[in-house]
Structure formats: C-alpha cells, structure tokens
Amino acid sequence: MSLKQGAALALAIATCVTGAAWADTIKVGVIASFSGPFAQYGTQYRQAIEAYQAQHGKTAGEHEIEFIYKDVGGTNPDQARALAQELLIRDRVDYLAGFTFTPNALAVASMATQSETPTVIFNAATSAINKDSEFFLRTSYTLWQVSVPLAEWAYDQGIRTVATTVTDYGPGIDAENAFREAFEAKGGEVIDEIRMPLSTTDFTPFIQRVRDQKPDAVFAFLPGGPPTFTFTKTYNENGLKAEGIRFLGTAETEEVNLQGLGDAAIGLTTAYHYSGAHDSDANRAFLAKLNELDPKAIANWASVGAYDGVHLIYQMVAAAGSDGPAAVEAVKSLEWESPRGPLKMDPETRTVIQNVYIREVERNPDTNLLQNTEKGIIATVGDLGWDK
Amino acid sequence: MGRFVPLILLAVAVGLYFLLPYNLAFLTRILIMVLLVLSLDLVLGYAGIATLGQAAMYGAGAYAAGLFAIHVWADPLAGLVAGAVAGAILALVSGLVILRAQGLTVIMLTIAVAQICAEIANRARDITGGADGLRGIRMDPVLGLFEFDFVGQVGYWYALIVVAVIFCFLMVLGRSSFGLSLRGIHESPARMGAIGVSVYWRRVAAYTIGGAIAGIAGALTAQITQLVSLETFAFVLSAEALIMLILGGTGRLYGAAIGTFVFMWAHHTAASNDPFNWLFVIGAMVLAVVFLLPKGLISMPAALTQIFKGGRDAGT
C-alpha cells in the first residue's frame, strides 16, 4: 500500500470512528430490500423517507441530510454486513437505517458498536436484537408488544378458549408463545397449537381442525400477502365466522394487501400499532404528503416505521450532529406525536413505547375501501418480550 | 498460457486490495463465493455430477464452524477444519445415496438434501437460533497474531490465502490420476467402467472432496460475518453458484474464479447504481454470455480469435 493510500485509509477509519464533526452533510445509509419478492418493503421505506423530507425539509440543525440506498435482497446477513461496511468506510455514513429481517440487523450489530454508529431499525421485530448493540434503536414493534395486549383484550371480551394457528417459522413461534403466555396468565385456555408449514397453500385441514374443537376464537399469525389472503378466505368459507369462532390477528390485515382480501376480511379483529385509518392530524398530513408524491402509495407498518425512524434520525442529527454516542443519548427518552399516535422511546430497550389498537376491518362508506377501524386502545405498551 | 492464468488471478486479487481499500468486505465475499463455485466445479465440471444443492454443504460448514467457535474453540483455522469435516460428512452420507441415481433424479435429490438441512436448522432453534440466525460468534486472531479488523484487511488476506491454497490443491488434484479418471467418467461413465474404474466410488470421493471445500467456504463466511442464517442453505445460493460457474466456463478452475468475479462485480455495480431495477442488467448479461459464448467467458479469447481470423479469411 502506498503511503498516500495508507493515509487515506487511516483517515477514512478515523473519521468513521470518531465521527466527522466538521461535515455539514450527514449521510444516512439505508439497507433494505429493493429487489426480489420483498421489494415492496424497500419501496415503502423510500416513499416514507421522501414524504418526511418533503414535509420537514432536508436539513436538521445545521446539517443537510442525505440518504443512500443499498439493496440487500431478502434475508442475507453476509450482504447486509458487507453493505454496512462499505457504507461506513467508503461512503462515510454517520447513521444506518432500514433492516426488515432480524438476521440482517444482527449481522451489523458489532459494526454499529465498533464504529459507534446509531442504527435505526425500521422493522426487524425480534425483541432480543437491541441487546446486541447499544447503538440500535427501533421504531417498529415487537411481536410480544402486539400479541400480549391482544390476548388480554380477548380474555376481557369473554373469550375463554383459543386455538392458535401460526406459520412455522421464527416470528410465528414468537407470536404463539407470547399469546399463550399472556392468555393463560389471565386464566384462559389455549386448546390447540397448530403450526403450519411456511409453504402451505391450502389451509382447509388446519381450519377444519380448529372448527372441530369449537374454540371461542382462533389466533393467527401468518406472513403478509398470499398466505393471509388464503387463510382468511378459508376461515370464511368453512363457516367459522358463522359459527361464532372469532378471528384474532396482528399484521394480517395490513393496508397494502387489505383491498385484495375483499369482503372476506370484513369483521376480522386485529391488534396492531398502526392503522392507515388512524384518526389524527399527523396521520392525515402524512397520508396527504405520501399520496402527493406518489398517488399509488399506501401507508402501512413499513411506511410508518421508516417515517418515525427518519424523525428519530433528524432529532439525533439536530442534537448531536455526527457524534454517535451523544446522538443515541439525546433521543433515549424522546417523545413525539407520530402518524400512529403518541410515541416514546424506552431508554432501556430502545424500542418505542406505543399504543396498541384493537381494530376491526370495515368498509369505509365514503371511499368504499376496506380499512382497519380502531375500536379500542391499549395505551403505552413497551417491548414486553425484552426479558423473555 | 493456461499456466500463467492462476498467477495472473493472484496478482489481480492482490492488486484489488490496494486499488479498492474501501470495498474489502465485498471483495472478501467474492473470494468466499469463488471457493463455493470451485467446489461446484469439481463436482459438476470435473466429475459431471449435476447438482443444485451445493449450498447444503456450504451451510453445514457454516453452522459447524459457528457452533465450534461458540462452544469449543474460537481459533479460525480449527474452525475451517470443523467446517470441512462437516461438509465432507454430509456430502459423503448424502452422496452414497444420491449418486446411485442418474440425471434429473440426482438434481432433485441434491435440492432435497439442502431443503432438509434448512428445515433441520430451522427446527433446532435452541442450537442454531432458527430464523433469527446463529449469533455470538467471536473469533480469535488468525494464528494468534492477526485480529479480524473493522475494515476487513485481515479477513481479506485470510480468505485469499485459503482460496489460493484450495486452488493449488485442486490444480494438483485435476492433474493426478484421480482427476484424470474423473474427466474420463465425465466423458463416458460406461467406458470408464469397462476399463475397470469404480465409477460410483470415484464420484462419491469427488462429491465428498467438493463437500469439504464447500464446507470451508461456509466456515469462512461464518467467521467473517460472525452470523450464520438459514439462507446459507438457500436454493438461490446453489443456483447462483451454478450460474457463476456456467458464466465462467465449467471444467476449468479459472473459469470458476472468473465467472464468480464477473457475476458478483456486475451484480454489485448494477445494484449500487440502481438499487431498484438492477436485476435486469444481470439477466441481460447472463443471456448474452449463454448465447454468444456457450462455453463461458473463458472461451472469449478463442471466440475473438475466430472472429478476427474469420474476417480476414472472408476478405481474401
């Protein structure tokens, strides 16, 4: 290595470790999926980031903020780590953001810690992620955070027996554990725990098994898109709804796929932190800006996770510029009004404390579109899975 | 000319280190992928075993090295051995069954083995971390001297040396009587059988060696990324490795290296210039190579010579 290159490299490392305090443009590296089957998530993030910048300008404090997008495809920790390294060393970003899948976030934990780079997770919902780095902040939710309130609410509604049906993979099992623990603690009974293979396309046997046992309700956790669609359709066709077996879910009725579910979805009950139909000025302004930039844009959990993530980054930049530890310290107890409702950062778990809403799918008489109408609020829920 | 190609490749790899000091993580990923594609070249290009499941051994090596580092010993070289052993055992056990079949059945079975491994890793959450990935891998310095650094310098040299050693090993193997018999089996299994070669056992041996090398590649990725996910068993990985091999040209070691490099480089450049539509570029590139250079990029010099000569001949 020539002396010049050596010096350049040393400088690069030094700036990325100590933070380029003199830089007036602060760069944020966004690692997310922009291609392949999960490209929708990346698109949602980008639309939300652009909406935030259109609303609040491109400067925070005295610094201009620039976003650099990197495509990680799907679950690909090797790629996530390589991209993070490239962003930190070559592009000299001061903040990292994005991360839809848990392994991708975990892969950059040690780098975030070593380089003292605040990293805002827009989605990855496994509780334990934030234990891996002091520089991880999360603006999405955890599965415990929404499943536990749902179980408690269900018991309070007089539901005593539940069959759980979850897709057999990490998040599904998390949801099953969270729901069972909370429901049994209340005094309810989980009479059957069904785990369905990820590749299931015909849910009839599982639904039939639930029907035979006649529980008061069926708790479901499925990945978004076609599985949810088929599951809810099967749920209706097999007469569970008619027999009074209620549907309890979380992300199943998220907005991007909601219209596709059609009338079959009407009446589905879910507990979740964001509904596109949330009644507040902040949400209306967010939706208006989103649709102004792209008329086809639909706001869902991914959009609001990114939107609040950008807000957090703006606050950190305004408070501490590119000084990583100070930036994290500055927002550890931040409170703000998000499109989803009031938010507060939990200094211990570094995940947002938020309201969980009990919603029911209805058809909006004005727009004739399906929406998640909020029917109840469980206020200020933190990450309940932190100590599990 | 063929004799100098490996040296040129080595010079390129060393040169890239100085030219692109900010992209070492990416370059290291290329090196690891080269190793996986080399193992595929041995199995497919030399021994003629059509496989779409090389990721099974890669993943086994990655998990073995990861678990070995967490529970037994965090020494990198010992981890490589653990990865190689895991890859070899899986290849041997599955190979004994798979290689009794022929043609399409072999492809199906190799895919099945990778899927089964992925499902086992998914179920054994307590050991492997399931869909969250295996974490907590912290490596000791290489040889007790070189600690893995943030920029990835040590990781790069470490991977480069491992790849170079394996490359030399495969060069020797390719010229040994064993390697020649593999080529013979590739050309005509019936004839090799007729002259007294045990086709089945030679194939099992080649599959096992290929498995060990894929296991080493997996171990490298586990040590450098410090995380192993279920995706190490992914079908996409096996398929991409195959595309890289075909792109470069099968049956030649440097074909595997060149194909991997070109594919990943195009992938990286296209994806960073346009993170939204880059797949189109990759598709166009693969199509162009398959149509214009059916024997892969290594046949480019020959093809160019032919065009040049053809033009002159037509003129006279």
Image: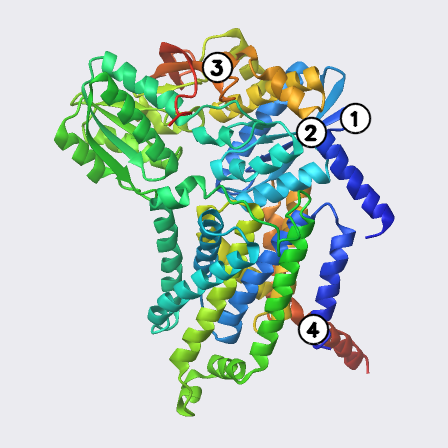
Residue that numbered label 2 is attached to: A94
The image quadrant that residue A154 belongs to is top left
Q: Quadrant of the C terminus of chain A?
A: top left
The chain under label 4 reads B
> Looking at numbered disc 1 in the image, what kind of residue is underneath it?
Ala
Q: Residue at x 35, y 19 (%)?
A: A271
Residue that numbered label 4 is attached to: B303
> Looking at numbered disc 2 in the image, what kind of residue is underneath it?
Asp
Checking the image for residue A340, the label placed there is 3
> Looking at numbered disc 3 in the image, what kind of residue is underneath it?
Arg
Q: Is residue A236 above or below residue B87?
A: above
User: What is the crowding at mark 4: few (fewer than 14 residues within 10 Å), some, or many (at least 20)?
Assistant: some
Q: CA distance from mark 3 to mark 2?
A: 27 Å
Element carrying mark 4: helix
Q: Which residue is at the front of the view, A22 or A372?
A: A22
Residue A224 x, y percent position in the rendering = 40, 32
Residue that numbered label 1 is attached to: A23
Residue A159 vs residue A361: left or right? left
